[in-house]
Amino acid sequence: MSEERSGGRGRGGKKDDKAKGGERPRGGFFRRRRVCKFCADKIDYINYKDVRLLTPFIPERGKIQPRRISGTCAKHQRALQTAISRARQLALIPYVTD
Amino acid sequence: MSQNRQYELVYIVAPETGEQEIADLHTQIEQIVQRFHGTFDKTENWGRRKLAYEIGHHKEGVYVVETITGSGEMVKEIERRLRVADTIIRYLTVRVDEDLRVAQRRQDERKSTQARRRTARGLPPEPQPGERRGDMDEDDDRMDGVEGGR
């Protein structure tokens, strides 16, 4: 599972450029669009106090991972956004990390 | 009723405050809640935790989570108190009743659909322990295949 994930992330950078030359940068063979984690796990309420739930969506830099990379659906990305900003306010998650 | 809203109140107390002071803060809040005829549902002390970033030269803090039901005026008063207290380095109040209700409804819906589908397939409405896992995995795989084919 972790292998697939890192492949998905890498695509955001280099692989994307390559695909742009031909057609729309859609999934390659090895990379499939990941299913929304919250839909798959049937999480209805994204709790801002649950750091372990939120960290996978916060890359090193501390920004919120975009939907196109994480595969989260629009509805849950919105909920995730509020949960992350609440957690940031409570210093559970950093605003920025250099 | 609009008077009975559930709130989650999280506050961070400076790490050098003693146990007694933290308890005092808690009773202060409880008194406010009682004064406004609210109810105190739950309190949780997470204890000392490292902060993700420094807040006023503090690197650690004691987290306290309280769940309260009451009116907006009550929250206003509590927040005013928390703002004045210098041992509090950060607080956050979130209204949770609506979100939780929505989540609960969705869960109920999911359960009823599952029961309906299962009875249509001639299975008992509740999934048996041990059987469910495999059922779900099979479903997931099928979904993956469809997505990949596109």
Image: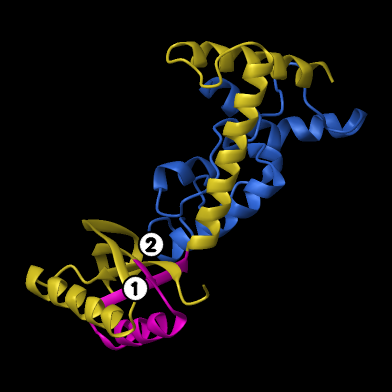
Chain colours: A blue, B yellow
Looking at the image, can residue B87 be seen? no
Q: Position of residue A2 (x, y in %)?
A: 52, 23
Position of B123 with respect to B50 (left or right) is right
The label shown at residue B142 is: none
Q: Residues within 10 Å of mark 2 (few under 14, many from 20)?
A: many
Q: Position of residue B38 (x, y in %)?
A: 34, 75
* Label 1 chain ID: B
Q: Amino acid at mark 2?
A: Ala
Q: Secondary structure at mark 2?
A: loop
Looking at the image, can residue B7 be seen? yes
Q: Which residue is mark 2?
A: A91
Do tag 1 and tag 2 residues touch (Cβ < 8 Å)?
yes
**As displayed, is residue A77 above or below residue B117?**
below
Q: Which residues are magenta?
A: B68-95
Magenta span includes B73? yes
Q: Amino acid at mark 1?
A: Arg
Toward the viewer: A4 or A35? Answer: A35
Residue located at (67% from left, 38% from top): A69
Q: Position of residue B25 (x, y in %)?
A: 19, 77
Position of B36 with respect to A11 (left or right) is left
Q: Quadrant of residue B117?
A: top right
User: Distance from label 1 to label 2 (Cα)?
Assistant: 9 Å
Position of A74 with respect to A52 (left or right) is right
Q: Which residue is mark 1?
A: B90
Residue located at (62% from left, 39% from top): B109
